[in-house]
């Protein structure tokens, strides 16, 4: 049996890289080699990063050659891409690497492209008769807008994590928005009265091997930003929808599905698929499902045994800071802070968070 595995994280600059690394920190047999298109990404400063290699943006052909050389020089056993851009790269080029190393499970290219494209996903869901909000792609035809029930949400085609979403209450508000932000390519959905809820999965050829279901209870920085507090729940009716979705996509690998409960129709509608690891992946680990670890096990062709998760509450670090300002007495619950927040991970490995804070100050123009 191999004693140590060298893991290549090829996108150390991704938003979720440190969270994934923290899910794997307790496994002493893993050594992490990190590539990054940023010279000073937060993961560089983690005590769990064994080697950090910065590279300039390369052409696809040169990037393949570069990564192959790293795999050989660093004796890489498993490739662990984290974000969609890098996952897409390895889906396209995996045959270039599999002679030398293993890779975590990935979907095929056509299904991946459906999942990450809001417009393609809406068409897919409608064709497969899976629940979704009424959706259109606005191309200048005002008759399409008149068919929608307000309020509506305008969603940027290429943004994730709630960035850039605008809620409009009326057709007049839409015209006003368009006069300030002219465009003939907008993805628009009817706003669903209800609440958001998510399902995180890892799959093999359309079969869900493990999952968690979580509902937010602590608002992020904006109304559409990721939640800072999560409640893990049993919710079989959501799982039924997600099972159908993953099966019809023949999905392999991880995904984080955003859904919304429609209080008028009493069902759960698919909003978006994040075909990558996600910000609350550590919360899933604390609840009992370690998605990065299961991904590595699958890369090594090891069976994933039946998994269950605990129905807990969890608060991310920014949520803890929010409580510190608005409800400081909540911080007196030391047991909760230690067992149900990101605080222990950050105390044990503080430098990536300090680097994030420095980057934030730089963006704000603070010297």
Image (tube, helix red, strand yellow):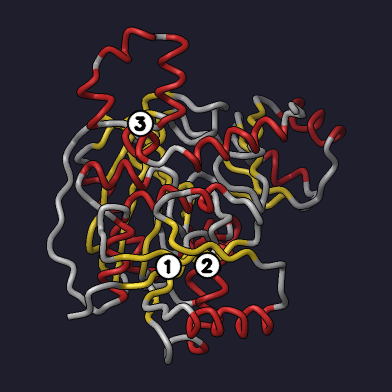
Q: Residues within 10 Å of mark 2 (few under 14, many from 20)?
A: many
Q: Secondary structure at mark 2?
A: loop
* Quadrant location of the C terminus in the rendered image: top right
Residue 175 image offset from top left, x and y in percent: 80, 32
253 left or right of 305 in image: right
94 left or right of 344 in image: right
Closer to the camera in the image, 136 or 290 = 290
- Depicted 348 relative to depicted 129: above or below: above
The label nearer to you, 1 versus 3, is 3
Residue drawn at x 43%, y 62% as measured from the top left: 50
Q: Is residue 81 visible?
A: no
Closer to the camera in the image, 45 or 343 = 45
Q: Secondary structure at mark 1?
A: loop
Q: CA distance from mark 1 to mark 2?
A: 7 Å
Residue 217 image offset from top left, x and y in percent: 37, 25
Residue drawn at x 37%, y 72% as measured from the top left: 6
**Count of numbered circles on the image:** 3
The answer to whether the residues at label 1 and label 2 have Cβ atoms under 8 Å apart is yes
Q: Which residue is mark 3?
A: 343
- Depicted 102 relative to depicted 201: above or below: below
Q: Nearer the N terminus, badge 1 or badge 3?
A: 1
Q: CA distance from mark 2 to mark 3?
A: 26 Å
Q: Which residue is mark 1?
A: 80
Residue drawn at x 47%, y 60% as measured from the top left: 82
Tell me the tag on residue 63.
none
Q: Secondary structure at mark 3?
A: helix
Q: CA distance from mark 1 to mark 3?
A: 25 Å
282 left or right of 41 in image: left
Q: Which residue is mark 2?
A: 10
Q: Nearer the N terminus, badge 1 or badge 2?
A: 2
99 left or right of 238 in image: right
């Amino acid at each position: 049996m191999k004693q140590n595995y060298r893991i290549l994280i090829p996108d150390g600059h991704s938003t979720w890289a440190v969270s994934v690394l923290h899910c794997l920190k307790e496994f002493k047999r893993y050594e992490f080699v990190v590539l990054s298109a940023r010279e000073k990404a937060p993961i560089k400063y983690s005590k769990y990063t064994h080697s950090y290699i910065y590279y300039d943006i390369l052409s696809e052909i040169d990037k393949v050659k570069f990564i192959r050389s790293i795999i050989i020089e660093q004796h890489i056993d498993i490739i662990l891409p984290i974000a969609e851009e890098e996952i897409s790269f390895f889906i396209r080029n995996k045959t270039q690497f599999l002679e030398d190393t293993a890779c975590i499970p990935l979907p095929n290219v056509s299904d991946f492209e459906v999942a990450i494209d809001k417009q393609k996903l809406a068409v897919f869901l409608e064709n497969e008769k899976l629940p979704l909000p009424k959706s259109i792609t606005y191309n200048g035809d005002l008759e399409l807008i008149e068919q929608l029930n307000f309020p509506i949400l305008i969603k940027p085609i290429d943004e994730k994590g709630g960035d850039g979403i605008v809620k409009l209450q009326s057709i007049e508000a839409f015209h006003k928005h368009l006069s300030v932000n002219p465009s003939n390519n907008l993805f628009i959905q009817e706003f669903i009265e209800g609440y958001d809820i998510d399902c995180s999965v890892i799959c093999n050829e359309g079969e869900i091997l493990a999952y968690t279901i979580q509902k937010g209870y602590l608002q992020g920085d904006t109304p559409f930003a990721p939640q800072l507090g999560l409640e893990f729940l049993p919710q079989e009716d959501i799982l039924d929808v997600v099972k159908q979705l993953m099966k019809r996509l023949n999905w392999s690998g991880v995904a984080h599905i955003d859904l919304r409960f429609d209080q008028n129709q009493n069902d759960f509608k698919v909003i978006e698929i994040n075909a990558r690891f996600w910000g609350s992946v550590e919360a899933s680990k604390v609840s009992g499902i370690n998605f990065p670890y299961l991904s590595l096990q699958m890369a090594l062709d090891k069976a994933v045994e039946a998994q269950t998760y605990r129905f807990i509450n969890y608060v991310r670090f920014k949520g803890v800071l929010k409580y510190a300002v608005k409800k400081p007495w909540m911080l007196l619950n030391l047991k909760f802070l230690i067992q149900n927040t990101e605080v222990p991970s950050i105390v044990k490995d503080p430098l990536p968070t300090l680097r994030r804070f420095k980057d934030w100050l730089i963006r704000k123009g603070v010297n």
